[in-house]
Image: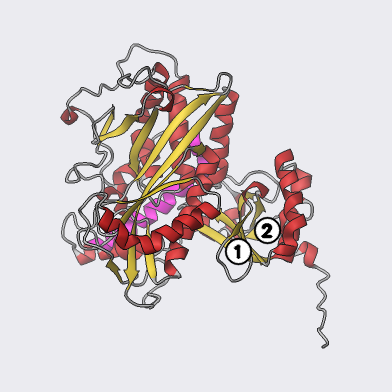
Amino acid sequence: MYVRSWSSPAAEGSVGRPSFVADHGLWDEARTAAAERIEASLADVDLVRLVFGDPHGLARSKTLTAEAFRTVLRNGMNFSPGPFVFDTGHAVAVDFLGEHGIGVDEIAGAGNFLLVPDPLTFQMLPGHDARTAWVIGDEYLRDGTPHPLSSRAVLRRVADRYAQHALAPVVGLEVEWYLTRRLDDEPGNTGNGFGLQGRAPRVQALNAGYQFNLDAHYDTLAPLTDPLALHLLALGLPLRSMEHESGPGQVETTFSPMSALDAADAMLLFRTLAKSWCARRGHHASFMSKPLLDAADPSGWHLNQSVTDLASGTNLFGTEGPSGGPSPQGKAYAEGLLSYAAELCLLSVPTVNGYRRLAAEHTLAPTRLGFSQEDRSAMLRLVGHGAGAHIENRIGEPCANPYLNIAAQLFAGLEGLTAPADASAPHDESAPSGEAALVPQHLREALEAFRAGRAARLLGQPLAACLTKLKDSELRRHEAWCAQAAPAPGQVTAWEQREYFGAY
């Protein structure tokens, strides 16, 4: 049988830039060695998903043949900046054809950027018909500098600051989400468009909820969550537990502590694959904080964090004895988190819907800007004792951008650790909760604090400006809808369900 051989003389120049990685010295020895191992194994791979997390924390990807990826690995891949200019509803929020105000020339005219695979993130995805790999990329401008709008680059910079102080942050993930059964296969495209999201998936709860950690309720989820757990373990993720939370079909998934970048990469992979795993089995997984479902209880993302002294290998937050309070370093770190809490709340709770959870009616929600060992209404808790002591920040929503959420926490904590000692009293956990400031109660409040605060110190001016435009666009569309529809106060709206339930 004759099979035609199609020639492609321009293939080397069709993606990225020849020798882009080598010319700009983008890899260290570990990544160079990993790339060589990948190249040697590509004969056992059919397809590669090249992925990056956009400003909203959603995974954007291109699926390449293994042969195409062989070139992309060292040359990078051209990507459109669309994910940097669209808000959560795919409305154009950044005027890339006019005066965009971002400070990145490549945004003008929607010019391409280059996505370079990080060889250390390359892994095979089990359970696919085609032998498919997943690899996360880093965004670069065409001159080889890190893209100013890259979320992953922000977290890298923060981790590098810790290393300069001979410190290493440690992060543990506790993520709540909803598992539901789809009622139909309709895609929800009617009425969909730029800034006009179509109908959200129609779903049904898997149980009645409101029996916390009830084994019988978990059993209704187990046909999906048990195989999903095995799937996550096969990927090498440090899964600890799958638990039934309070809401109907609400799940909490926890992971063992990781380095900062590994934790963010793991969160991106986990959320993306949990959704695809459930979708292939007629179910829907959503990380929207409070979906428009009967009796839904809001979902949160608890971020556990500690800091290791690299010289001694000890945990700076370690306590003495089971009843020991926070160490001086732990207190200083917590003060940093509280100092920046309002200004950086947008990075932990980035959607209109996420602030439903922070309302006073939810008694277990972290509504108070405080630091406590036991009070769950405080934003921060000291958890554990001895070498295992760590700070739990309970403010985040599950769909937050993992790179920006983690970076915001670590940045603020390091600011507290490195601040000069002063005579001001720390936040006292014994203070009556009514006397403490509240966390922002609405996305508009969080955006105003973000715009007026010190966010650019963490993000850089271009990304701070970009996020401001993205969130302002999202808010204006929501407020315009509410002005016309006049929804009941305090209720999750149909707009929120269409905007977030499917995408997140």
**At 50% across and 58% down in the image, what residue appears?**
231
Q: Which region shows up in magenta? A: 455-482
Please say if 400 is above or below 492: above
Tell me the kind of residue under disc 2.
Met
Residue 44, how many percent across, how many down?
A: 71, 63
Name the disc covering residue 77, or none: 2
- 409 horizontally vs 219: left or right: right
Answer with left or right where residue 120 lies relative to residue 345. right
From this viewpoint, is residue 58 visible? no
Q: Position of residue 227 (x, y in %)?
A: 45, 60
- Residue depicted at x 51% and y 40%: 461
The answer to the question of whether label 1 and label 2 lie on touching residues, with beta carbons closer than 8 A, is yes
Image x and y of residue 504, in percent: 40, 59
Q: Amino acid at mark 1?
A: Lys
Q: Secondary structure at mark 1?
A: strand
| Residue 227 on the magenta segment | no
